[in-house]
Amino acid sequence: MSSLQLQAINGKSQLLVRTPFPNKKCVRKPFILRPQAVSSKTQRIMESVSVSGEVGGAGGAYSYQALKRLDQLWSNICSPQQVVQEPQQVVSTIPSLFTSSDLADKAEGSYDVIVCGGTLGIFIATALCARGLRVAIVERNVLKGREQEWNISRKELLELVEVGVLEEDDIERVTSAKFNPNRCGFERKGEIWVNNILNLGVSPARLIEIVKKRFISLGGVVFEGLSVSSISVYDDAAILKLSGDKILSSRLIIDAMGNFSPIVKQIRRGRKPDGVCLVVGTCARGFENNSLSDVIFSSSTVKKVGDSKAQYFWEAFPAGSGPLDRTTYMFTYVEPQPGSPKLEELLEEYWDLMPEYQLCCFLLDGVHLQFLYDRVFHLTI
Ligand SMILES: Cc1cc2nc3c(=O)[nH]c(=O)nc-3n(C[C@H](O)[C@H](O)[C@H](O)COP(=O)(O)OP(=O)(O)OC[C@H]3O[C@@H](n4cnc5c(N)ncnc54)[C@H](O)[C@@H]3O)c2cc1C
């Protein structure tokens, strides 16, 4: 059994997971039936976590409202599509010269490259700036990384040093957790332990702050709080219209707007994605054995969820916010179709499965614990 509580970590409220069996005498209470509005466990937990500073980008929002918004969007994608709706035309071609058009005087800036979308976009924008190009970046939110860490390998960070995005000293500054070795495993197929693969927890907030400063110091220009409305490709320039009718001109535009890029939507002509990876998870406190990580681990066969079936995979690693803090993700691959599980349904599964996964799969340095039955462990070395 596990109990869930909330506790402030570094000024933010995060989820605390405790796993002891409470040593209490069982006192029978009179059973009284009261009519109640039924809220899911997910709603109760998420509404008790204080939310501050949500950011754009994948994994940047974590309120219950954000979950409902995402589930609504996901339901729309899953709904049966009788007629494929043509998406809004964001990019269009105008076979003439921009410099001789009526709009020519209205462009507020002219760049070699404009990068749309700031989360990973800031890295390519800075690398291009370091090569002497005039670069701007457009981000519809504030250009800021989320609090929860990204996992990465040192080798990958060194590649950012090589292209002038980071200094080598920055690697230590942005690293909040290090762990080795790391497990990959599938039910009854054995385990493979690897070293130095995705074994650093890097703070996106600190990393993006450092890179943003570097980008600006190299002459890069940041447009925040403005979203891409349209792109007109002329013979001599690509013209970007932003919300608020701002107009920028560029030789090249790079789309780094992630999964919900309006340009990708246009290219797919309204067709839904072929497959989707749904991810749910938490950062929770109370893990005594917290020095190893799972890169990918599957401890069960396909399960029924909602009206469809899913194979769950786990990813878990120490979090930088404290020695007992651990991030755990449960993810699955599905086709977007009616009956595919909603994220809230997956979270309901997560609350049930996560304590068992973390308890039975996580090892006391070489000691394996396994659930044989509810409350019966098998212990082996
Ligand atoms: C829970 C979770 C955990 C993850 N953990 C890891 C990890 O540990 N390591 C890892 O490598 N990856 C991880 N990922 C994958 C993650 O998707 C990427 O690391 C990264 O966030 C992708 O960045 P992106 O810039 O491509 O897209 P996004 O993060 O989606 O960013 C797109 C950006 O474009 C902006 N944008 C969108 N539309 C517009 C518009 N019209 N105009 C202007 N701006 C716009 C958005 O505001 C956003 O800032 C994780 C993902 C999730 C969901």
Image (tube, helix red, strand yellow):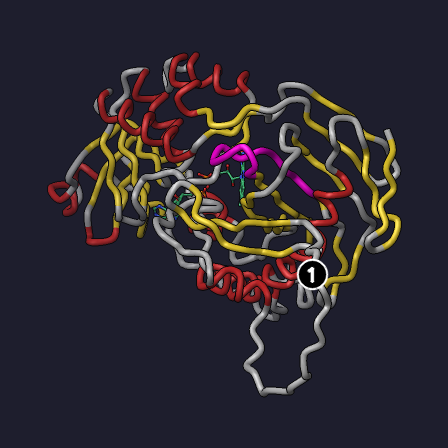
Q: Residue at x 47, y 45 (%)?
A: 58
Q: Is mark 1 on a helix, strand or loop?
A: loop
Return the x and y of residue 61 as percentages of the image width and height.
43, 51
Which stretch did the figure color magenta? 314-325
Task: Give the left or right position of residue 11, taking residue 175 as reference.
Answer: left
Q: Residues within 10 Å of mark 1 (few under 14, many from 20)?
A: few
Outermost residue on the left side: it is: 105
The quadrant in which residue 107 appears is top left
Indicate yes or no whether the magenta region holds residue 27. no
Return the x and y of residue 32 as percentages of the image width and height.
64, 86
Q: Is residue 360 above or below residue 112?
A: below
Return the x and y of residue 256 as percentages of the image width and height.
42, 38
According to the picture, the residue beneath numbered tag 1 turns out to be: 24
Q: Which residue is drawn at 69% across and 67% down?
A: 339
Indicate yes or no whether the magenta region holds residue 319. yes
The quadrant in which residue 34 appears is bottom right
- Pick the residue in front: 37 or 143: 37
- Pick the residue in front: 232 or 37: 37
Residue type, numbered disc 1: Lys
Q: Which image quadrant: the C terminus?
A: top right
